[in-house]
Amino acid sequence: MNDLVRRTNLIVSLISFAGIDGIWKYNADAITLDLRRATPEILSSTSRKWLRISEHFASYGGAEVFLAVDASNIQNQLDAAIWPGISGILLSGAPDQSLLRVTSAKMDDMEGRRGLANGSLEIIPLLDTAAAVWNVREIISAVPRTRQVILDESSLARDVGITPDIDIDPFVYARGRVIAEAVSKGVQPVGDPHPLGTLLADFPQSRLMAEGTRFNDLGFKGLLLQNTNWVSTMNLAFSPSNDLVEYYQTVRRLFAEGVARGTAAVPLGTRMIDVPVDEWAKTVLARSARCKARDQQKADAKQNID
Amino acid sequence: MNLPPVRRSGLTMPVNNKRFVEKAWTRGCDFIILDLEDSVPISEKVKARGLVKASISLAMKGGAEVFVRINHDTVEDDLEAIVWPGLKRVVYPKTETANEISSIDSILTRLELARDIEPGSIEIGANVETALGVINAFEIAAASPRIKEFGGGGGYDMSRDLGVEMFVDFDQFVYGKGELELAARVEHLRVNAVAFLSNPSGSVSDTDHALRLAKATYAMGFQIGGGLHPNVVEPGNKGFTPSPEEMESAGKDLEFFNQLSSEGISEGYRNGRVIDRYEAERAKTLLNWAQACDKKNTTKSEALALANEALDE
């Protein structure tokens, strides 16, 4: 699987979000400016300048910048959105591969016209209907631009007629399907935790951390967030903790000692360490290093502003 | 009704660990997996292959079936070294495609013929331990008649592939396990599945947890166990074996249903439960399983006695 560190992707509406000039302060790994409900006026030439300025604001803190678009007015949205400095688009409303292929072809053209390397922009499909979840395999395989896929649980709940309820989790199967399919293709699965994403309530920090950890432990590599207050907690939830790093350093040391003695089955307390445990330890330690590097990158970007 | 194979308890051990292998037959397992894969360091692989033939004979002394887990990337060399009389199953790790299984099947067919082993008698255990294996589950399950049991979908390799921690307080593998079970059912294979019981400590030797896990797994309709530590053998044997109370109740259900049938009645109530032909079938299956367990226990006891006698001499 690719090794992107995109633990948090903060999505804000360009229409209704106040304070776009300070969006970079929330410390998200990525920021998505949502154009999906933008009217033709908003996409007009005057407003395009504002959009480009917003893209710059979003990137101030070292975040990658994406634009969320949909099928309804896609050519205008892409015309307005695609400029050097953005990392790609989030594409909603694709029940199968066809919209991805069409959009990717349009992006080929846009990249050529705007001085961007061909194929450099990502398309992150938002799986927002039952059909999209069912067709996840063809969706994530449709174009090589796809490195992440998002299970948009809020929209999926609307599509299948579920009223969000904090005590009921209706998407165990959908999550499992998306994670397995994505991982098998080397694409990172990203969550949009139902019903937190739809309720937008102020949860206690501990509850947020528990939810983030649960999504991490399911196999998601990050979350799409609408609430600015959740970003720092979710960055933590999707980074290996210090305790975990320390534990896996011990695993690596003991395993190496075991191998030197001629065995690859080494006890650690009541656990047993063998090759896959050591391999997982390597993965966790590498992930931790990448998360720290990403945090440093963002910190440096902020320092440059100051 | 044929008696099913009884595989309630199993121990996986590195074949290059002399101490483990020499004691294996005394542990009371229904099956033993001699490992050439993850518990054997790369530097020991060649030497380990050379130990398998003698280890099979040794491990089966206590009446256990003997399986060998090979390496995903050295199939031919491993199979050449392990296909000998006494081998019941080749365990193939990280199975991802049907082609991998077909290829193993072909090699086994050739080696069985060359080494005077009953054709088709060696089973293939297709361990699915990656997301790719999960999405190809149906093709894998149908890839060879040597696959008699199918399932899995958890474990360290799967956790590594998904990028998740192994020991958490919920079943992070539930989707994959479900897909594999469905594939097994479609192909009329025995399901090799395990219930989820939270085990944050990750202990491989906790007898209490092992017993609860075996009982929970059995209650879900599955009958196959396994483990890494001798402590979990007896809990496996016990947890997957019907209790005397269960057998008595099943016997009475069957008797009651037979009585109803003789009177031309299709269903009736016993102890507040509806007894119909489905319940009668369930009772028959349970009694059949109990009989199989009893037979396996006898086989192991007799084998153990013989082996101990030989030692005394």
Image (cartoon, rainbow, N blue to C red):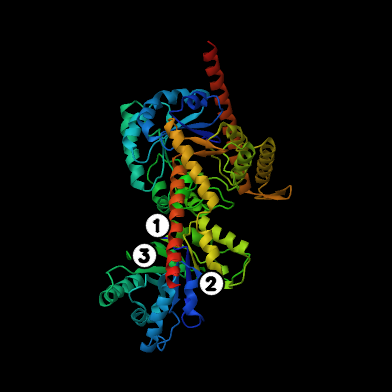
> Disc 2 on helix, strand or loop?
helix
Callout 1 amino acid: Asp
Name the residue that disc number 1 marks: A3
Q: Quadrant of residue B242?
A: top right
Instruction: Tell which subunit mark 2 falls on.
Output: A
Residue A86 x, y percent position in the rendering? 37, 72
Mark 1 closeness class: few <14, some 14–19, many ≥20 residues within 10 Å: few
Residue A175 x, y percent position in the rendering? 50, 61
Question: Which is nearer the N-term, disc 1 or disc 3?
Answer: 1
Nearer to the camera, B129 or B271: B129
- Residue drawn at x 42%, y 47% as measured from the top left: B141
Q: Are circles 3 and 2 on residues that touch, CB within 8 Å?
A: no
Name the residue that disc number 3 marks: A146
> Disc 1 on helix, strand or loop?
loop
Q: Quadrant of the N terminus of chain B?
A: top right
For residue A105, side relative to residue B268 (left or right): left
Mark 3 closeness class: few <14, some 14–19, many ≥20 residues within 10 Å: many
- Tags 1 and 3 both on a single chain: yes
The Cα atoms of the two marked residues, 1 and 3, are separated by 13 Å
Instruction: Tell which subunit mark 3 falls on.
Output: A
Nearer to the camera, B305 or B208: B208
Nearer to the camera, A293 or B256: A293
- Residue drawn at x 69%, y 43% as measured from the top left: B256
- Residue drawn at x 44%, y 79% as measured from the top left: A36
Question: Which is nearer the N-term, disc 3 or disc 2?
Answer: 3
For residue A169, side relative to residue A89 (left or right): right
Question: Which is nearer the N-term, disc 2 or disc 1?
Answer: 1
Callout 3 amino acid: Thr
Name the residue that disc number 2 marks: A228
The Cα atoms of the two marked residues, 2 and 1, are separated by 25 Å
Residue B174 x, y percent position in the rendering? 53, 53
Whether residue B132 appears in this view of the structure is yes
